[in-house]
Image (tube, rainbow, N blue to C red):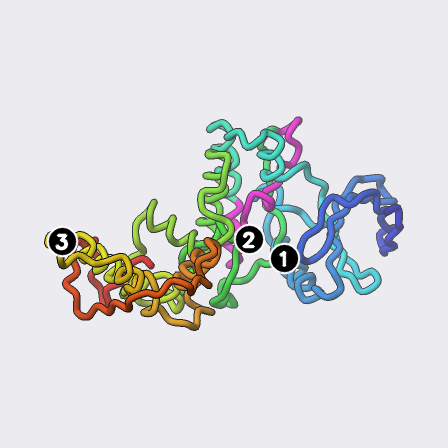
Amino acid sequence: IYEVLPTTSGGYLVETFLGEGRFGKVARCLKLKTNEKMALKIVRTDAGTTGKREVAMLRRLRKLDEDKNNLVRMTEYFRHKGHYCLVFEMLDTSLHDLMKERNSKPLCLSGIRVISQQMLVALNALKSIGLLHTDIKPDNVMLVNHKLQPFRVKLIDFGLAATVSTMFLGTIQALGYRAPEVILGLPLDEAVDMWSLGCVLAFLYLGKHLYPTHCEYEVMRVIVQMQGQPGDRLLNNGINTRNFFSKNKDLEDVASLLKRMLHVDCKKRISPSEALGHRFITMRHLPRHTHDRSYVTAARSTLRDCGLSKQSSVQFKRFVTSNDEVFGLPPRCQCTEEWTSA
């Protein structure tokens, strides 16, 4: 703090640090030549590639009118002791911090409408130059000056932005704001940003995240619960589909166990020791290697968290089912393969 960072334009006095993220810190600075308050993003030396890419993306934004299109304005950038330093206009607070100040009290609809309109203008502008933000979340939508211009906002942080032509399959977006096509491993385009924006607006309306923010499998489970199972085209083309959807042997096995437990003839009804050896309980039918199987990982984690994974003192009677008649299964979509939510 209070270090002067020299530049060709006169230099900046670091007054205080405002926050820190994966790739660096943000400080409030005084521009010595004009006495203006500015925001300075100092990128970590080991994240130089990220800083270089963000500069490239922000230079593309100069094709647009940043104020008119509700995008943060970078005034200059420079290198200091191996760090990329990006200078931005000083903004107010993020939507995340606004909701925190309100104790997560939902925002009024008139405010949500104004924010929606501005962010849609921003996305439309990005689409016009073939740019994806890929990290839209409440932290990256900033109020400009909430006292003087209530709900005037700008989109910030283009450190993970990419062009449509160079977009690749992979993990992008904050969990909970991640589009289903990203989770399933499908080709990506500007629509991923629209999904994230929808999640932001829902956050403002509900006062909480619309989708879970801790587990990708839980995100997909809630999507299926609320909006239905993704269509056949998405499931058949997603390279990660089998991590979340499968020909669900587990579903068939729970139906098998229920059938044995509910047998009308009490003499044929399954015993406790037999039930403990049933494959639905033992999970023998599930693959052991779970690095890419979210459903199996979640199932075993639940067992482990309950402290049951190492119980071995009880002797089970192994009960193997074969070709059991399965009853009462919920309908599954009809596609090239029959998929069901894991």
Residue 106, position as x, y percentages in the image: 50, 30
| Mark 2 and mark 3: Cα distance apart in space | 58 Å
Q: What SS does tag 1 mark?
A: loop
Left of 322 or right of it: where is 137? Answer: right
Q: Which residue is mark 1?
A: 159
Checking the image for residue 315, the label placed there is none
| Mark 2 and mark 1: Cα distance apart in space | 9 Å
Question: Quadrant of the rendered structure where residue 308 is?
Answer: bottom left
Q: Which residues are magenta?
A: 122-149
Of labels 2 and 3, earlier in sequence is 2
Residue 54, position as x, y percentages in the image: 65, 59
Residue 305, position as x, y percentages in the image: 48, 55
Q: Indicate yes or no whether the magenta region holds residue 136.
A: yes
Of labels 2 and 1, earlier in sequence is 2
Q: Is residue 125 visible?
A: yes
Q: Which residue is mark 2?
A: 135
Residue type beneath disc 3: Cys
Left of 65 or right of it: where is 190? Answer: left
From the image, state whether disc 2 or disc 3 is nearer to you. 3
| Mark 1 and mark 3: Cα distance apart in space | 65 Å
Q: Which residue is mark 3?
A: 266
